[in-house]
Amino acid sequence: MNPAVVEMLECPKCKGAFRLNKDDLVCAQCENKVPIRNGIPRFVGAEVNNQTAENFGAQWLEFDQFNEKVHQQQFLDWIHPVTPEFIRDKIILEAGCGNGRHTRLVASWGAKAVIGVDFSNAVEAARRNTEDLPNVQIIQADILSLPFKRVFDYAFSVGVLHHLPDPRLGFLSLAACLRSGGAVSAWVYGRENNEWITGFVNPIREQLTSKLPFSALYYLSYVPSSVLYAMLRMVYAPARRRNLDHRLFYGDYLGYISQFPFREIHNIVHDHLTAPIAFYISREEFEGWYEEVKARDVEISWHNRNSWRGFGVLPSPL
């Protein structure tokens, strides 16, 4: 580990500082030991007993692809109004890094340091996909108990908070790692315009698909993925080229993803079917998170008419 990263950490048990040993981190105050395996500090147990972490960990180990053309623009859309220029020379925290594709993008934009955190064993894929970047460190930890001091200039979480048992507390935990004047972005499922998902898809996901073994769901999800992909290519993609996709059912979103390759569509379908927990957040609730941390320059916008993206800056001391 980079010693500079160790300086950013604090013990989640007592808030003490860590010192770096060969194979672990040791709290100088309470002697809490955190093992380092494969270059990754493990603030959660070796066996993660959490269905959400297990399901998403398996997903990101399988869907390990990175399509720069697709994923860079998609990521910029999710963190709007943040730009690559905003990232330069900043210390960045990503909460829920999955396979590390966004971690890698942010690091390539000139960040001083990027810390990618995930609760699941997807950290193995994230480590593999970023190990050539000296400004990246992957850490396995719980978003609700992040082991960091207030040292980050910018923190973001894309598509993760709504899968936590308490999305609001996840956001507050993320904001608590920011220095004064630091900025935070989040992207979450919206409650508005998603009634057909909460009423039809969610019960199937909760009662059936999220309980299936990964291999079973992986192949089962080929069926709706294939149907969706055919519809996207034959209907939504031509409509998007003629600027008519907004007139179709769920057209803003389906028109948007009609440009994606099949592998990405399969990933999206699998993602929606695998999560044991998925909250759909109203704009009012989402805005309340930013109000609670007293953020300024807040910008909340509706993305593809099915999700909310937010940005805000924490107040600086007087």
Image (cartoon, grey):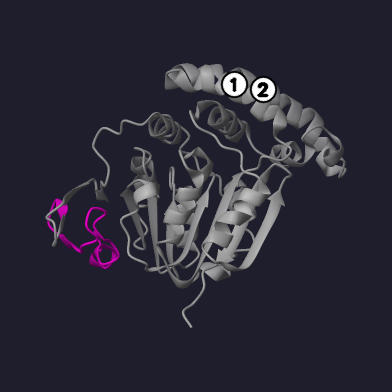
**Vertical placement of 98 versus 297: above or below?**
above
Where does the image place residue 260, in percent across and percent down from the top left? 65, 38
Magenta: main secondary structure: loop
Please name the residue that numbered disc 1 is placed on: 203
Relative horizontal placement of residue 228, taking residue 51 as reference (left or right): right
Q: Residues within 10 Å of mark 1 (few under 14, many from 20)?
A: few
Q: Is residue 160 visible?
A: no
Instruction: Please name the residue shown 56% across and 55% down the image.
Output: 289
Q: Residue at x 44, y 19 (%)?
A: 215
Mark 2 residue crowding within 10 angstroms, few (<14) / some (14–19) / many (20+): few
The kind of residue on which mark 2 rests is: Phe
Q: CA distance from mark 2 to mark 1?
A: 6 Å
The reply to whether residue 177 is in sight is yes
Instruction: Give the percent coordinates (x, y) of residue 123.
Output: 35, 43
Query: Is residue 2 located in the magenta-colored stretch of the structure?
Result: yes
The amino acid at mark 1 is Pro
User: What residue do we see at 70% from left, 35% from top?
Assistant: 194
On the picture, is 305 further left or further right than 248?
left
* Cβ atoms under marks 2 and 1 closer than 8 Å: yes
Q: Residue furthest bottom?
A: 318
- Lateral position of residue 250 relative to residue 68, left or right: right
Query: Is 318 in front, or is 52?
Result: 318
The residue shown at (33%, 41%) is 124
Q: Which residues are magenta?
A: 1-25
Magenta stretch containing residue 153, yes or no?
no
* Direction from residue 84 to residue 48 in the image, left or right: left
Which quadrant holds residue 30? bottom left
| The N terminus lies in quadrant | bottom left
Q: Position of residue 258 (x, y in %)?
A: 72, 37
- Residue 200's label in the rendered image is 2
